[in-house]
Amino acid sequence: MSDVRRAWIARAVDLARGQLRASFAATAGTVVLLWASLTPSLMPRTAVFQALLTALCMLAGYGAGGLAGWLVRCCGGRLAGRARVIAWRVLAAVGGIGTLIVLGLSLRWENEVRDLVEVDRVGLLHVVLTVLITTVLFALLLSLARGSRALGRTIGRFVGRFLPAAASAVIGGLIAALLLYWLAIGVGGNRLLGALDSSFAAINEEFSTEMPPPTAPELTAGPVSAQDWEDLGRQGRVFVANAPSADDIGAFTQKPALQPVRAYVGAGPEGVDIRDEAREAVAELEALGGFDRAVVNVATGTGRGWVNENQAQALEFMWGGDTATVSLQYSYLPSWMSFVLDRQRAQDAGLALFDAVYGRWLEIPEADRPLLVVSGESLGSFGGEAAFSGAQDLATRTDGALFVGPTADNRLWDRFTEEREPGTPQVLPVLDDGEIVRFADQPEDWTKPAAWDGTRIGYLQHANDPITWWSPSVALERPDWLAEERGRDVSPNVRWIPGVTMLQLGVDQFSASAVPDGQGHEFGTAPVRAWAAILPPPGWTDQQTEELVEVIGDRALLR
């Protein structure tokens, strides 16, 4: 072996030793948080997502343990001599044996969650892959963390020329943290948002087929529309193209039906006021004859403008096509990116669109006004709520609303949940005896209590949907849904662990739409039963609801 190769090997060994070197407290914290990360939560996890979660928790444990050890040393405490040797040996034995036990339990917990949400079980390979990927991710994260600490020490030494050593160390760490935050969030965040917007704007122009624009005058980009087919964006074109025909609806109702109106406006150029786009959407709705229909549905979409077809089609089929749905695109980003990076857009869009529609609706003679409803799913529900101040406002200015898969940041949803009647669970609250607002996980929940007169506002949510239950507050405070009896299809082994549960729910969100209908963030045909409870046409029956569920389900398979 050459001297150069020996030198490189020696350097690599020294580097590895440096990376593995850690204090007793930091190592103990790492082990404890490793164990905690393997406990179950709401969704099944792939090996990659479990590894990501575990690596993040281990890094948090390393940092917390290191801080605790530093504080102990500052107070004069220190392991030394034989006590230090014994402590490390005990930690190695307990950590090694405990980790093997927890890994075995984690496989059982993982399969328990998988059974609850009805997805395939995993075996020993899942554990092996998790361990390998975790090792790589933790090493990378630890290297980054130590690089940040080294920056803080460098700044601290400079500050130490002017201030006492203890103060300079703290100030150096704070300056390094603020600098990294500014680079990552201020400069990097803005550039990232701009780059992502540009990238997804290009994707927005694509469509999966060369489908021509519609020929029906009731659809955007049709003969009487002021909108160009190419300007609708990918999700807008999908929304218009999926509109059922009058013949489709008539085949279900066995009566003459109308072609539903679908009005849509794509995202405008950068800098365009969202209120101008909303007014453009109302002009489009009026041009297509939307205000002459029995029902107008103001649907706030998700980030890229996606509107849930099952929600829209449920109303269209129930009302014999005598409906109009209006929506607009307010972002090029996927829903989760839009929520993380620029959630204000969703609220601005929901407020602007409803206010514009409502303003025109008020100009219609009262006897001729259509029923006015609002709807949205996930980020769309977050934006759709923005136009209203509370339950009475919703009841006064609309004839019904359906919000599916709300986020924990939904302002009204959060208030309604907090104000629920004592004794009712957070996952299925009852507000004011269900007079206006109701929450449902299963179809029968809409009928509890029995009387539901006047305007009906519905929230369709799942007890195991991490998008609904994730919140920063979960890091430090046990949520009610984990203090109460577990909701439907939530493992009884789910426990609240400070800090860890928040990370678990965050990672769970990436799997929330990869589960069967009726679980997580997948609602399938449930909006059909929801609309049947909220805004049924005269003479509508339960049998018709079940028949429509089958029709909407079959149509979804063809999309």
Image (cartoon, rainbow, N blue to C red):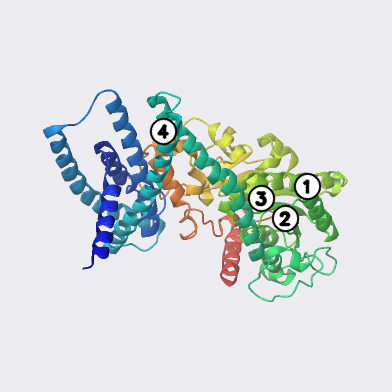
Tag 1 and tag 2, C-beta contact below 8 Å = no
Image quadrant containing the N terminus: bottom left
Mark 4 → mark 3, Cα distance in angstroms: 57 Å
Numbered disc in front, either 3 or 2:
2
Q: Residue at x 75, y 45 (%)?
A: 352
Residue most extreme to the front: 3
Q: Tell me which numbered mark, 3 or 1, is placed earlier along the sequence.
A: 1
Image quadrant containing the C terminus: bottom right
Dot 4, crowdedness within 10 Å: few (<14), some or many (≥20)? some
Hey, which quadrant is residue 331 in on the image? bottom right
Give above or below for 153 relative to 72.
below
Q: Tell which of 82 and 405 is nearer to you.
A: 82
Mark 1 → mark 4, Cα distance in angstroms: 53 Å
Mark 2 → mark 4, Cα distance in angstroms: 55 Å
- Residue 275, label in figure: 1
Which SS class for mark 2? strand
The residue labelled by disc 2 is 328
Tag 3 and tag 1, C-beta contact below 8 Å = no
The residue labelled by disc 4 is 157
At label 2, which amino acid type do we have? Leu
Query: Can residue 403 be seen?
Result: no
Dot 3, crowdedness within 10 Å: few (<14), some or many (≥20)? many
The residue labelled by disc 3 is 375
